[in-house]
Each structure stands twice: as C-alpha cells, then as structure tokens.
Image (cartoon, rainbow, N blue to C red):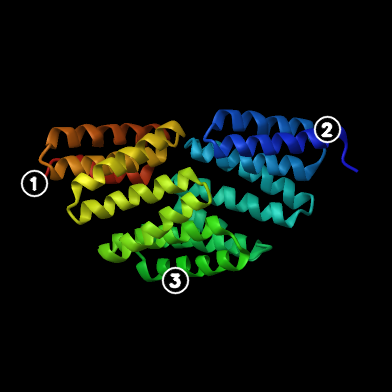
C-alpha cells in the first residue's frame, strides 16, 4: 500500500502536469521537483519526475539541462528495471538533443528507442522524431515514410495527440516540398485535432505552419494574424525556440510587403534568441538571410 509520502508525490506529479498543460512552466517545475523530494527512494516516482522536468526544460529551450535530467532518468530507470520509464527517458533525451541541433546524436537515441519501446505510442514517438530529422536534412521520402508509420502506430495506441502531431509533420513536409494544397488540408486537420485534445502548444505550432502555407500562396493578410497569434502563445509559454520560427515568418511577410527594415528587425530578434539558446541550425539559416546579397 502506498505511503503518505508516495501519495503526496503522485499528487505533486499530477499538479505539475496540470500546470504544464496550462503553460505555467515554472510552477510545473516546482511541483515536479516536489514530487522527487517526497518520493525519494521510489525509483519510479523519481524517474517520472526527472522525465517531466526534462520535458519542461526543453520547452524553456534549456536543452543541456533537459538532456542531463533525461540522462539521469534513463540511468535510474534502467538500473531499477523499469522498461517503460527507460523508454520515456530516451524520448526526453532525444527531444532535447534534436532541438539543440545535435541531429546525429538524437538519431542514435531514437534508434535505441525503437528497440527499447514497450508500446506503439513509444514506437510512434521514435518514428515521428526520426522523420523530423530526415525532414531537416531534406530526405523527403524517408521523412514521409517515418511520419506515416508514426501516424498508424499512434492510431493503434489510441494516442490522439500523437495523430495530431503526425498530421502537423506531414503538413509541414508537404509545404517544404512546395505542395501548398496538400499542406493546407493536412494542417487544417492537425489544428482541429490539436484543439480537440486541448493542446494549445500543438495548436500554435499548426497555426504557424499554416501561416507559412498562406505566405507561400501569397495570402499575406491571412498569414499575419496567424503568425502573430502563434508568436503570442509561444511568448506566454516561454518557448523561445518556437518564437524564432514565428519571427522568421513575420519577417518574410514584412519582406514580401516591401517592408525591408521591419523584416530585418524581426530577423534580428530571431537571431538574438537563437544565439541566446544555442539554436545552431536556426542561427545559420537566419545569418544566411541577413547576409548582404551579391
């Protein structure tokens, strides 16, 4: 029978999750740390707390901290013989590495996750992120195959949020390949699915991707409020990594409207954030846009 401290630790984990879903990330960290303290000595509770803290630090763009928490959770879960938590820790570790641009390291972690996964939800997460890495490298066919695989794995697991993520990734992939009509349909589905499961962060991501599609179609008046809304959400949730993407879309809109100086202001803000959080891939892309054209 659980002790009073274990019950308190479980309550703290639930309180942390509620705070995280409300985008109150500092409060979420407080509750997760409290859970680890109250559940000290119970490996499953401490490992879950570390995994959850890793996820919050990733959203705060503190990727080295996130990777460290995930590594500690991985070691604890593996040592205690907790295979499901071992896999969840690999998810958190891979996510932190991918966000920081360490794609090869992240790919290795996700390949390990494919082997360590205990259910289709975890396998779907592995395939989804493997697809994201392929997409960032421009390997479109491999990315599409991985995204479709993740979608069906999520459906098999009954993981609606995962299906919404897969739709969003497939929509973004279609946009990157220049198929605006396909992208529009997929991203509208992703936005509706994200709202249905009550995931404001995922809805904002679908919204900024839709804004990029509207820019590609020349519908700048429609794209601007979408990008501004997404930027507002990521500012409130302190997700600086996603703020970079929003600022770059706002810069492109300004550029197409002939507002060159405003575009440079947006790109400059995006560059400052990328430098501050060590977003190497994004920083290189922004520097290329800001470089004088020959």
Q: Is residue 261 above or below residue 293?
A: above
Q: Residue at the spot x=55%, y=32% of the render?
A: 25
Kindly tell me whether residue 291 is visible in this rendering: no
Q: Residues within 10 Å of mark 2 (few under 14, many from 20)?
A: some
Which residue, as the protein is rendered here, is positioned at the far right? 1
Q: Position of residue 144 (x, y in %)?
A: 41, 68
Label 3 and label 1: CA atoms lie apart by 39 Å
- Label 3 sits on a secondary structure element that is helix
In this view, the residue in front, 179 or 277, is 179
In this view, the residue in front, 230 or 130, is 230
Q: Who comes first in sequence, dot 2 or dot 3?
A: 2
Q: Residue at the spot x=12%, y=42% of the render?
A: 257
Q: Who comes first in sequence, dot 3 or dot 1?
A: 3
Q: Which residue in the protein does label 3 denote?
A: 145
In this view, the residue in front, 290 or 108, is 290
Q: Is residue 90 above or below residue 100?
A: below
Q: Residues within 10 Å of mark 1 (few under 14, many from 20)?
A: few
- Label 2 sits on a secondary structure element that is helix
Q: Position of residue 110 (x, y in %)?
A: 55, 59
Q: Is residue 210 above or below residue 32?
A: below
Q: Residue at the spot x=50%, y=52% of the render?
A: 196
Q: Which residue in the protein does label 1 denote?
A: 294
Residue 213, disc:
none
In this view, the residue in front, 159 or 277, is 159
């Amino acid at each position: 029978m659980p002790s009073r401290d274990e019950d308190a630790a479980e309550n703290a984990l639930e309180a942390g999750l509620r705070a995280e879903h409300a985008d109150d990330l500092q409060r979420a960290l407080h509750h997760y740390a409290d859970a680890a303290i109250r559940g000290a000595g119970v490996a499953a509770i401490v490992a879950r707390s570390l995994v959850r803290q890793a996820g919050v630090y990733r959203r705060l763009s503190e990727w080295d901290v996130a990777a460290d928490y995930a590594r500690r959770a991985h070691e604890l879960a593996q040592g205690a013989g907790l295979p499901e938590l071992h896999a969840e820790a690999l998810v958190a570790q891979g996510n932190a590495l991918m966000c920081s641009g360490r794609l090869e390291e992240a790919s290795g972690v996700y390949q390990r996750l494919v082997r360590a996964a205990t259910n289709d939800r975890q396998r779907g997460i592995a395939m989804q992120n493997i697809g994201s890495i392929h997409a960032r490298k421009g390997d479109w066919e491999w990315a599409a195959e991985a995204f479709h695989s993740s979608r069906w794995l999520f459906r098999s697991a009954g993981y609606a949020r995962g299906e919404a993520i897969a739709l969003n990734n497939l929509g973004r992939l279609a946009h990157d390949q220049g198929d605006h009509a396909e992208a529009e349909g997929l991203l509208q589905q992703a936005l509706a699915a994200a709202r249905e499961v009550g995931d404001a962060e995922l809805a904002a991501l679908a919204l900024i991707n839709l804004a990029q599609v509207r820019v590609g179609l020349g519908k700048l008046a429609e794209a601007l409020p979408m990008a501004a809304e997404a930027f507002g959400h990521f500012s409130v949730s302190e997700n600086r990594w996603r703020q970079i993407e929003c600022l770059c879309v706002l810069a492109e809109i300004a550029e197409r409207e002939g507002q060159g100086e405003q575009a440079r202001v947006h790109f400059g803000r995006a560059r400052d954030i990328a430098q501050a959080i060590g977003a190497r891939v994004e920083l290189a892309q922004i520097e290329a846009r800001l470089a004088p054209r020959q």
